[in-house]
Amino acid sequence: MLKRNATLCASAVLLLALAGCASTEPPPKPEMTKVNAVQTEATVTAIDQKKRMVTLKFEDGHSTTFKAGPEVRNLAQVRKGDTVRTSYYESLAVRVEKAAPGAKPSEKVTSDTARAPLGEMPAGVVTNYVDVTAQVTALDRSRALATLKGPRGNLVDVKVRDPSTLDNVKVGDMVNVTYTESLAIEVERTAKK
């Protein structure tokens, strides 16, 4: 299911992955991290440069056609038979640190994008960071588990890698959680046989 979702995500956000360019500092090292990664590959089976329509056939046999918007640069380099590789990563990182007095649950979303220089094969990366301040509603120190209540009232159980990070935390404290997802896309020329 995750592979299928990444395949659909890849075709849906191809336009985003190839648009814009920015960079920021990575978040501080977390006490707990959970990472999922999925890679997919598709072949360009048809391309209409004039109409900017691209058809991709994925490893599982299904195809999808989409229109590449004007923000997708370097489309002129793409040909039938080229390979499109996608890598989708998501991670949940928890930093156990007390928030300022009176802090409320909150959420902040930031994004970074980068793309290949003009004239090269299309490639790009989109990274979304979601920083959440959540309230600790329960602690199970024997299992290194904290239950957090987010800004929308949802409850999430989070297992920390190092149980000692919970030593200075009590029910009612605010902690920071970072969710990160990245999608990288690159197009490669398939060698002629």
Image (spheres, rainbow, N blue to C red):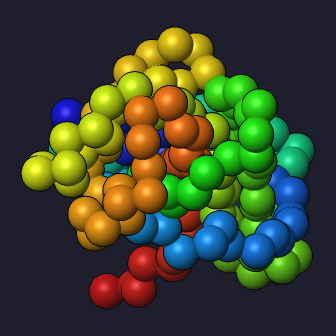
Looking at this view, is 187 or 104 the one in front?
A: 104
Q: Is residue 114 above or below residue 170?
A: below
What is the quadrant of the N terminus in the image?
top left
Left or right of 60? Residue 165 is right
Q: Is residue 61 visible?
A: no
Q: Residue at x 88, y 44 (%)?
A: 70
Q: Residue furthest top?
A: 153
Looking at this view, is 141 or 61 the one in front?
A: 141
Q: How far across and down, in percent of the image, does residue 162 sit?
A: 28, 69
Q: Is residue 81 above or below residue 69?
A: below
Q: Residue at x 81, y 70 (%)?
A: 24
Q: Is residue 1 visible?
A: yes
Q: How far across and down, in percent of the image, does residue 141 sit?
A: 20, 49
Q: Residue at x 31, y 86 (%)?
A: 193
Q: Residue furthest left?
A: 142
Q: Quadrant of residue 107?
A: top right
Q: How far across and down, in percent of the image, does residue 128 sit?
A: 65, 49
Q: Residue at x 61, y 21 (%)?
A: 151
